Amino acid sequence: MISINNVVKRFGPVVAVNNLSCNIENGSVFGLIGSNGSGKSTLLRMISGVYKPDAGEILIDSENSYDNAEIKQKCCFISDFPYFTSSDTINSLSKLYKNIYSNWSDERYNQLCAMFPVSPKAPVINMSKGMQRQAALILALSTRPEYLLLDEIFDGLDPVVRQLLKKLLADEIAERNMTVIIASHNLRELEDLCDHIGLLHKGGILLEKDLDEAKLGMHKLQLVFDSEKDRSFFEGFDIMTFGKKGRVINMTVKGNAEEIDRRIEELGPIFHESLPLTLEELFISEMEAAGYDINNIIG
Amino acid sequence: MTSTTLSVDKKIKGKSNFASMLVWTLRKNTAVSVVYTTLLFVFFPLMVMWATAMIIASLSGHSSMAEMAKELNEIVKYGYPVTSWLTNIFAIIISGLLFNYLHNKRSVDMYNALPISRKAMYFSKYVAGLLIITVPVIVTHFMGVIILTAIGACAPFDYLPTLLYVLLSTIATYTFTSFLCVCSGKTSSAIILSIGLSCALPIAVLITNLMITSWVPGFQTFLDMPAVIYMLFSPESIAFAACYGYNFYENGMTPDLLGFTLYFVIFAAALAIGGYFVYKKRKMECAQSEASLKLPEWIIRVIVTYGCGLSLGFIFSMVFGESGSAVASILWFWIGVIFATASAHIVLEVILNKGFKNFVKNLKIYAVSVGALVFVYVLAITGLFGGYAYVPAPESVSQIEIKATPTFISEYYFGSEYENKMVVSDSETIGLITDIHSGIVDQIKQNESIPFLGNGIDFSDVYRDYYDSYVNLSPLSITYKLKGGGSVTRYYSSDYMRTSDIYGKYKSLLYSKAFIDSSITNIEKTVEQSNEPTVSAYLAWGEIDYEDGFIDSNGYTSKVAVLRILEALKEDISDPDKLNALKKYEKYLVDYYSEEEPEYKIYCLDIGLDYGSVSIYIPEDFRNTIGEIRKISK
């Protein structure tokens, strides 16, 4: 399990991660979402031991991960821009990883090389962005990590490889109880993959929940009344977003689904429909609630 | 599994990861290693092979293989340390290549996420670099030496000291640059700071010395300063200093050279270990931005700015302030200082911080540089805050080492093989010397303007006291050993002994039997150490008597004969009348261009040494000495 306790990270005057705490259970796929500069990548770098927190602690299996080679044996981190020198090939890097990671599996390496459409003998630096990520994935998965930390991994991957990646991760989780943390802006892919999400904003965590639970606790309603109603009409509801077009009202509400339906019916709508929330809608609702002026950004 | 087993497992894994990263780093740098080794091979073994082939091809009846091999040996002995330029350039390049990953955010992510402790990571990189820079040097060295040994030019271990100093220099440069890489946010900053400091520090020390020596009477800091001070952070110069400056092949491991060597061994070791501690604490987010540890950068910037300011101030003062006006000299000095310090600060700011975003914040570095310059300037013009006038009380002095030469002896030397010094500890002579010293200080106070602003900076002043070109009157160097510990050294040119009062006392010191005996003994020692001393004698003053034969005694080579003449001179000196005769003729020697002819003949005995000569003027009534000289005359 990964325990993040009151972690703070500053870059000069900028507080990138501010007193953040959360726990990530083994075998889960934890999606880190958040606005740009919310601290997702910084948090991944601290978990993987690249950066040292200025305050607080990050424990992996109850041990501090910073400068702890033994704990790092269990982790593998693919950054948003994987690093390769001009002479690196997947094969040459595999020699380094094989010697360094005690769980390295040649068999798995060969399987992965066969699965991904990249040449292990070609210089990685000459490959496309997506292929470089595939190279990094082959190496990372061959180390058989207990904790896989992925930053913007879907960026540049074609749909087929995305599906392949999702399948591979699902298999690893099922077989070895691997824990995956993915920071991404690709909420559609995360929605398929994650069972937990952490929503970061300005270095803090706004929401950390089981994804289904988070979705179930929030509802998108479409309502039609016989006359125009404004927001005050819905007093007592925990409204996240509210919009109206004439007599048609769209709003996102937090709370128990049955309770909300019952109270809406009491208001006498002509039409009432409760729709499932996508992760993207969930993200936007939470961010708006946190003061993130989406309308202003979209213009 | 017990905790002990776990701990042992950790250690084994740590070592294996260290080895894995070491091998990986070596493999990654194969190309640069090959280029480096090839260049070293061309510089040493290939050149030796080529020279050997040329020798064999050019052997004739006039020269033997042994003679040619000896010539080759001489060339290699002095040419080989030049390879340290190459090794040092590569030491900087390789440290930049190996620690470059710390200065790139992507590589920082990759390397620091690997399951390797910071200790293992740092030392694997450091040791890989050491192997890359040293192994080719050792291999090519022994290849060259095998060839030299095969043709009989040298013994197998003759060049071992040179190899060790080339290695020490290379390792120190590599460690120094690596340390700066670990401290810096950018590789370019580390390399610029490493090279900048290596150039600026010797210049800064040299010109500071020059300024004090030029302006403050009695101080020859230029000569007193051990070479290691100039090279404190300039490991690039170790090989040259050890092989040329300290003349290792002539003098072996002198205390100076030992101190210098130990300093750089400790320097390299301390920076290697210091580098680890900085690495351990390094914030990896510094990559591509600011320094992780700013102190070294600040110190180097202060030294570079100071060195630039002093250099240009010195040049402006010399070039534009030569009108003899103190005001012009001062003005131009400070115009140069301000122009150079401001330029240096701006250039460093732009290079190191990529613009002016920290310009105001870093003005404190500029302020410290200019503050140091003002301090040194005030130090010089006030005669080290009045320290120039300090004369130890005779009762506080336990011993004095005095360096001077009696007027009847002249030295012309290019090295330091002859140095006429005498140690005195009797209270009477100590009193006499402090009297002379006090007289000189009084004369300075009367005749020189204080603060010492008058003459600008003049490089010739540095050697003024040692090479008095037109008056054959010896300068004086006094080193007091104080009873309370410590020592005080002062140097005075003959200019300061012009008043009859001081000169009378100085003469009584120079012409005391003890001092002259000591002078001759020093010449004897120098002759004994010399390889092929020569002796010549001729008539310096008086009517030439063609039956005399002295005019034909040029260039006679015999160490024994020279020592016999010196022994005879000692015998003559032991006669008080003859000692007085020396004093009598002294006026002709002091004023060489006097039109007055001496009443008696004065002969000159020239002793040729390895790197110069000593001339002794001998009156005709020194019968023992002249008798010995006649034996070698034709």
Image: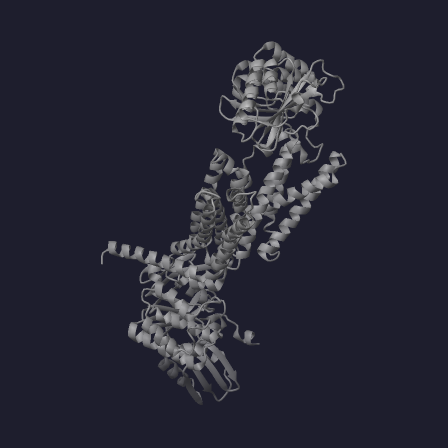
Q: Which residue lies furthest to the top in this view?
A: B577
Q: In which quarter of the image is residue B417?
A: top right
Residue B222 appears at what percent x and percent y?
60, 34
Task: Pick the residue in front: B563 or B55.
Answer: B55
Q: Position of residue B46 (x, y in %)?
A: 51, 53
Q: In this view, does A8 lie above or below B588?
A: below
Residue for point 33% across, 65% down = A74
Q: Where is residue B297 in the image (x, y as percent from the top left)?
A: 54, 49
Q: Quadrant of the N terminus of chain B?
A: bottom left
Q: Please give the count of numbered marks on the rendered protein.
A: 0
Depth check, front residue: B633 or B495: B633
User: In this view of the protein, can residue B17 be seen by the observer?
Assistant: yes
Q: In which quarter of the image is residue B6?
A: bottom left
Image quadrant occupied by the C terminus of chain B = top right
Nearest the viewer among B238 and B606 is: B606
Residue B30 vertical placement versus B183 (above, below): below
Toward the front, the furthest residue is B61
Q: Where is residue B543 in the image (x, y as percent from the top left)?
A: 72, 17
Does residue B581 appear left or right of residue A166 in this picture?
right
Residue drawn at x 28%, y 57% is: B9
Residue displayed at 64% across by 15% down: B582
Q: Does B251 sit left or right of A215 as displayed?
A: right
Q: Residue shown at 45%/66% (left/top)?
A: A41
Give the answer, above or below, for where B411 lies relative to B262. Answer: above
